[in-house]
Image (cartoon, rainbow, N blue to C red):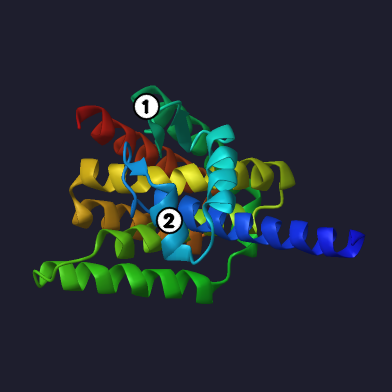
Amino acid sequence: MADSKKFQAKKQYNLMDKAYDSIKANICNNTIESGALLSESQIAEELGMSRTPVREALKALAMEGYVEIRVGIGAYVKPISYRELLDLYAVRRALEIAAVETALDNITDAEINDLESRFNELLKRYRAHENIELQEFIDVDLALHELLVEKCENRYIKDFMEKIMDNIRRIQMVSFKALNDLEESTQQHLNLLELIRKRDIDKLAEALARHMDWSISCIKAF
């Protein structure tokens, strides 16, 4: 009997994890938009489970600030406020610039070449008037910034960035719409990659700061 209860608890826990991961991923990639109501029954049906693990997942996401639960109404995706967005960018800016100090010697030419190729291909397609999916550009954009953090030797920077990375991914869609200039953004990223190739820490830190400030200024104007 005890083993059976443990099995049921473990099964329930695993289903809650599945629901949690699915809902959070859809929030962070904007498949579910800010302010959208979250139907327990619909999510449960889509995931092939009962409403109980979905309800528990929503409670967990509410504790992390992704969801807000209102009595008598239900759960909905909690929007990131303008103030939160600016605060998040300020923290990200400081951490990435600090990461540069120990990251450059650990980034390989192959990694630089790969990112340059991806950005240049996007630019080529954009100039040919091909429709570029927002998520496609966001994935390449974040790949460069994540590389700086991944290759740095400061574990505290890595730990802090890991904690805020889901929200960074979430606001990238807002940022992209605010920037509304794929060519300028791509050119800035290519410039960052060139400075990484040259291992020029000072100029890279300055260029990264300007890039972040440009992004924030576009969001403020938006």
Relative horizontal placement of residue 218, taking residue 63 as reference (left or right): left
Determine crowd level at label 1: few under 14, some 14-19, many 20+ residues with C-alpha closer than 10 A: few
Q: Position of residue 75 (x, y in %)?
A: 43, 37
Determine whether 115 is above or below 152 in the image.
below
Q: Position of residue 206 (x, y in %)?
A: 44, 40
Determine whether 131 is above or below 171 in the image.
below
> According to the image, label 2 marks what residue?
43
Kind of residue indicated by mark 1: Ser
Determine crowd level at label 2: few under 14, some 14-19, many 20+ residues with C-alpha closer than 10 A: some
Outermost front residue: 1
Which sits in the foreground, 205 or 169?
169
Which sits in the foreground, 152 or 69?
69
Q: Position of residue 7 (x, y in %)?
A: 80, 64
Q: Residue at x 73, y 47 (%)?
A: 155
Q: Which mark is in front, 2 or 1?
A: 2
Whole-angstrom CA distance, mark 2 to mark 1, is 26 Å
Determine whether 4 is above or below 200 in the image.
below
